[in-house]
Image (cartoon, coloured by chain):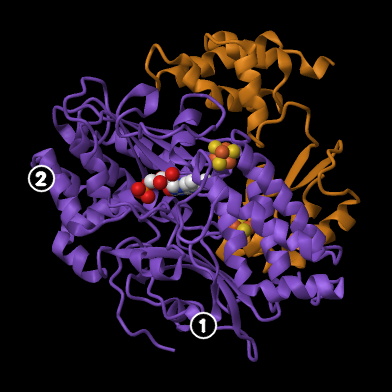
Chain colours: A orange, B purple
Amino acid sequence: MHHAAMTPDDTARLESGIAKILQRYPADRKSAAMLPALRLLQEIKGWLVPEGVKKVAQLLGTTPERAHEVATFYIMFFTEKPGRYVIDVCTNLPCALRGAEGMLKYMETKLGTLAGTNGDKYFLRETECLASCGTAPCMQVNEDHHENLTKAKVDSILEKLQ
Amino acid sequence: MSLQHPVEKVVTRYWQHKDQPTLKGYKSRGGYQQLAKALDQQPAAIIETVKKSGLRGRGGAGFPTGLKWSFLPKDNPKPKYLCINADESEPGTAKDRFILENDPHSLLEGIGMACWALGAHTCYIYARGEFKGPSAILEKAIEEAYADGIFGKKLLGRDYELNVYQVRGAGAYICGEETALLESLEGKKGWPRLKPPFPAVVGLFGCPTIVNNVETISTLPTLFEKGPEWFQNIGAGKSGGTRLVTLSGAVNRPGTYEVGMKTSLKELIYADEYGQGLPPGRAVKGVIPGGVSAPLLTGDELGVAMEFDAFKPLNSMAGSGGVIVMDDLCCMVRSLWRVVRFFAEESCGQCTPCRDGQPWMTRLLRKIEEGRGTPEDLETLQHVATSMAPYPPIGLGNTICALGDSGALAVHGFMKFKKEFEQHIAEHRCPYGERPWGAFGDFQ
Ligand SMILES: Cc1cc2nc3c(=O)[nH]c(=O)nc-3n(C[C@H](O)[C@H](O)[C@H](O)COP(=O)(O)O)c2cc1C
Ligand code: SF4
Ligand code: FES
C-alpha cells in the first residue's frame, strides 16, 4: 500500500496548491474548491488515495464523506489506481456513425484487453461524447485528445505508449 | 448545391488568423474596444441593446438573453454572479470548444460586457474536465487579460472590480444543466436543483446568478460593434445573429460551421460550403437536428431553417446545434440504443423515472436490436418513454431536469421509424447485420 501513502512532500504540495485555489472563492465557501482540490491531489498521486481525500476534506473544512461523494460522482476521478494509460474511446452516436465501434474492437484486440477492464498498463474504456463529433472518431489518452482517427493513426498513438 | 442566403460571420469572423487567440492578435482586430464603449454606457442600456438584437441562448433552450438578464433582481444586496457554461457534452455538439481554441478573448470581452451590465464582480467559466487543450488556451488568455489590466481590481482601468476564473469539471454530462453546474461549482456532485427558484434569483452560493453558454457571450463584441439592428437583420424571425452548428455522421464533409438562421438543414447537409452531401447512391434517412436531446426528423423534413422557432411545428428543437445525419444504410434501432444508453449512463440518479427508466429503455432496445425482442417490448418501450415525458409537445416531462425528457424524446422521435423496430422483432435479427452504421460506419 505504500504508493497510497501521502508523503510529507505530497501533503505540502497539496496544502500550498489548495491555498492558491481558495483565493478564487468566497472566504466562507471553502468547500466549493472540492473539484480543483481533488484534481490537484490526482495530479500529485496519480489517483485519489483515501488518505489524500481525507486531507482535502480537512483543508476545505468539510467531512471526508462529502469529499468521497464528489470523488465517486465524476468519471475523471479515480478512487482506485488506474492503469498507466487511461484510454477513453468515444462510442456515442456521431462517433459510431464514423466507425467508433470498429475502432474500439480494433484496440481491444491490439491491446489484448477488454473495454472496461482496469489493468496495470492500460485502462481502456468507452466514454461519452468528447466534442469531436465533426472530427470523429476520437479518443483521449491520459487526457490528451486525438481526433479524425484511422487505423494508421491509432497504431502510431499506441506505439508510443510504453 | 449553393446557398440561398449569404451568411455574415459573427462567431468565426477572425478564426482564419493564427494569432487571434493571443491578446495582441485579438486587439489588432479591434479587440476590447467594445468593452471600453460598453463601460461608458449605463448597464440598463446594454441590456436593452441585447434585448433588441434578438440574441438567444446557444446552450440548448434558445432563451432570449436580454430577457434572462432582466430577471436578475435589482434590489437584492447579495453579490451577483455570471457563470459561463463551457461544459459542452451534448452528443453531436462540438462548437464551444472551437471558440475557446480559436478566439478565447471574444468570450472574455463578452464576459466583461455582460458582468458590467449585470453588476457582477465575479465570473466563473465552468469548462468540462476533458477540455485539457481548450482549457489551457483559455487559461492563457485569462492570464493575458489580467496582465494587461483588463480584469482585476480595475476593469479596463475603470473603478469596477472584475475577477474571471476558470473552473474545470471532472467528467459528468449532467453538469451542463445549469443548476447541476452551480452545484458542481459549489464543490458538490452535479445534482440538478428543483426549480423554481431559478438561478437568476437563487443561484451560485444562494446569490442571483446568470448562466450563459460560451457562444452566447462571445457574440457580444460583434453584436455591439455592428449594432442590434444589424444582428437582428442577419437573423430570422425572433432569432438574431448566426449559429455555430456541428455537422456529423453520414456526410462527405462533417465539421463545425457558422450558418445563417435562414440556412436550411438541406443546405447544411448538401452545400459545397458545408457538408457536401452524402456518397453516391445514399440518401438521408434521419437527422437529429440539435444534439441527441432533440427529437429525430426524417429525410423529408430537411427544408426547415436553422432558426430556433422553425423546429417547433416539427415537434423538435434547434437545441445545441448538433446535427447528426443517418443514411439509408444505418440501423435506427442501434442508433437509438446508443442515444438512450448515453442518457442511462449520465442520469444523476436523483429521480426515479429517469434513474430507472433510461436503463430499462436501454435494455429493451438492446434486446430488440439483438433479435430477442417481442411486440410487447416495443409497447413497453413506448410506455416507459411516455411515463417519463409525454410527446408531443416538448416540455411535459415528469423529472427534476430535462435529461429525463431527453431519453424519452429520443424514443418518441425514433418511432417515426417504428416499422424498422417491428422488422427487427419479426425477423429476430438486425436487418443490417454486422454493418449497422451506414455509409461511413467502418473503421479504416
Ligand atoms: C441535461 C442538460 C445538459 C445541458 N448541457 C449544456 C451544455 O453542455 N452547455 C450549455 O451551454 N448548456 C447546456 N444545457 C443548457 C443549460 O441548462 C442552460 O440552459 C444554458 O447554459 C443557458 O445558457 P444560454 O441561455 O446562453 O443558452 C444543458 C441542459 C440540460 C438539461
Ligand atoms: S431527470 Fe435524471 S439527470 Fe435530471 S435530476 Fe432527475 S435523475 Fe438526475
Ligand atoms: S460523439 Fe464522439 S465526440 Fe461527440
Say the numbered circle drawn on residue B134: none
> Which amino acid type corresponds to the residue marked 1 in the rendered image?
Asp
Q: Which residue is mark 1?
A: B300
Q: Nearer the viewer, mark 2 or mark 1?
A: 1
Which of B395 and B291 lies nearest the eye of the viewer?
B395
Residue A65 placement: quadrant: top right
Quick one: label 2 or label 1, which is nearer the N terminus? 2
Which of A10 and A108 lies nearest the eye of the viewer?
A108
Give how far across and how far down residue B340 sits, in percent.
66, 54
Name the secondary structure under disc 1: helix
Residue depicted at 19% across the width and 58% down the height: B53
Residue depicted at 34% across the width and 52% down the height: B57
Does B32 sit left or right of B214 as displayed?
left
Q: Chain of mark 1?
A: B
Q: Is residue B25 visible to us here?
A: no
- Ligand 2 shows up in the quarter that is top right
Residue B279 placement: quadrant: bottom right
Residue depicted at 33% across the width and 70% down the height: B261
Name the secondary structure under disc 2: helix
Give how far across and how far down residue A28 sits, in percent.
40, 11
Q: Which residue is mark 2?
A: B45
